[in-house]
Image (spheres, grey):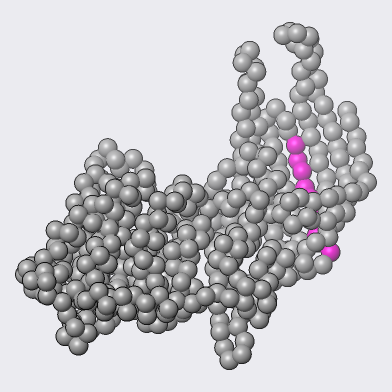
Amino acid sequence: MPVRDAGAQQSPSQRPRIGLALSGGGARGAAHIGVLKVLESMRVPVDCVAGTSMGAVVGGAYAAGTSAEEMEQVVANTDWVDVFTDQPPRGEISIRRKEDDYKGLFAPEFGIRDGAILLPKGVVAGVTIEGFLRRLSAPAASVSEFDRLPIPYRAVATDIATGEEVVLARGSLVRAMRASMAIPGALAPVEIDDRLLVDGGISNNLPIDVVRNLCNAEVVIAVNIGTPALTREQLGSSLAIVGQLTSFLGKATVDRQLAGLTARDVLIAPDLGDISAASFDRQKEAIAIGEVAARRQAGALAGYAVSPAQYAALRERRQHAGTVLGPVDEIRFEGIERTNAEVLSTLMASKPGRPLTEPQLDADLRRIYGRGDFESVDYRIERGPGRSALVVQVREKSIGPDYLRFGLALASDFHGQAHFNALASYRRTWLNRAGGEWLSEAQVGKDNYLFSEFYQPFERRGRYFVAPYARISRSTEDIFVGDDRVARYEVTETRLGVDLGTTLGTWGEVRIGPIFRDLD
């Protein structure tokens, strides 16, 4: 690449349009933040940005108006184990799903439909990831046309049905970033415009052509973080193998894109060594390496710098281009087929007429997801003449509405006695619009039982309910004197009952009702 005079600065009328292309690479993508820090410190303006996978995440946040320094702070303060765990905080899970925690049930949850068992589309649904992405892109929460972002932006994903590259230019910014990073098998695909989208690294892992077309960029700054191939010893799981295949496909597309670079373009290739796509605990290190790599290209970048006054004015305009959530006139739900909006509205702390905040909205969405009915929950802000609305977009589980889970519990008294209980739980949900649910369980082992309950809310908001149930159990009880077992009894119990109750939000429920009990 040519070296330019470090003292030369471009006037607004003279300077070329500059596009930024950011490649995918998982946790290695934190290096993009380091590159952005250098571009900001050198006052190199970016007129448009396109990214793939983690490059789409960093690029989308930057396009939304989040500075490199702010991104670095978010990365430093993020619990990455929590980000890649779909389970909301316990206080935001519905009481009926909390009860499952005491039964020893484990993942995955299977769907039952037309006599067939259905598997989830990914190990992680990605709801917590989307919450993280909302925090990164908060300044542009209400922008639905990516050309209207502070910096025009495109995310690249792949249509898993056809293998075609899909360039996302509108809609939910969070969903676009999430689709671009949906590694097949690990993260559930994202459905946008009737297309099922996965990681863009499969079809175009370094979107130089996309960003060049986006703003007719005369100069492209391309950041290629790459992903080194895993060794045979590291290929110990199906997810690792899928990741390896994705990386191989991505490398082929990167080679094609690099061939299109010109003498005016700048290629930055951070040497990330053994930092892998999954090394989220080493992102600070990756940021520093990205800075070093960008500094090595300082001579080429300096020729595109603008004056301090010009850069400050540009930053000011882009910061003001962001939007404030503010209050809305109504809250409505979109995507509901089996469930009903009145039940979901009781979980919303955000209310019409009150100022909206990102943390509160994030908690609202987690509570909705915590019901266990949805595979994704998002929102958008619609503003029209004299009226605005918060639209909560839900996508009901494609494997529902009937679910099968299994559980296993093991116990030992450390004196030669070991026990187990194996459980199967079958749950039929939304049998009617009020949210009727039929739960059936069977357990074998030390404690054998059959249980069935029909849970029926009285009204559509789901606050009051009736729950008839039946349980037949047989268990073995040992009687000890000191350390010696002196007797063993087999206890058979039959219970029939009808409860009337009320839910206390996600905190609990109160029940009262008659019970018939026969003990033998």
Q: Is residue 520 left or right of residue 416?
A: right
Q: Is residue 234 above or below residue 53?
A: above
Within the image, what quadrant is residue 382 found in?
bottom right
Tell me the quadrant of the picture where the C terminus can be found. top right
Residue 346 at least partly seen:
yes
Instruction: Name the spot of residue 215 as percent of width and height, x first.
Output: 26, 82
Residue 170 at least partly seen:
no
Please check the rendered image and state whether residue 231 is part of the magenta-colored stretch, yes or no.
no
Tell me the quadrant of the picture where the N terminus can be found. bottom left
Instruction: Name the spot of residue 305 as percent of width and height, x first.
Output: 19, 73
Instruction: Name the spot of residue 455 as percent of width and height, x first.
Output: 79, 56
**Closer to the camera, 274 or 64?**
64
Residue lying at 25% horizontally and 65% vertically, measured from the top left: 41
Instruction: Name the spot of residue 70 as percent of width and height, x first.
Output: 39, 61
Q: Is residue 336 above or below residue 34?
A: below
- Main secondary-structure element of the magenta-colored stretch: strand
Residue lying at 55% horizontally and 77% vertically, measured from the top left: 381
Residue extending furthest toward the front: 309
**Closer to the camera, 139 or 334?**
139
- Magenta segment range? 449-458
Q: Is residue 267 left or right of residue 52?
A: left
Q: Is residue 483 above or below residue 409?
A: above
Q: Is residue 370 above or below residue 153?
A: above
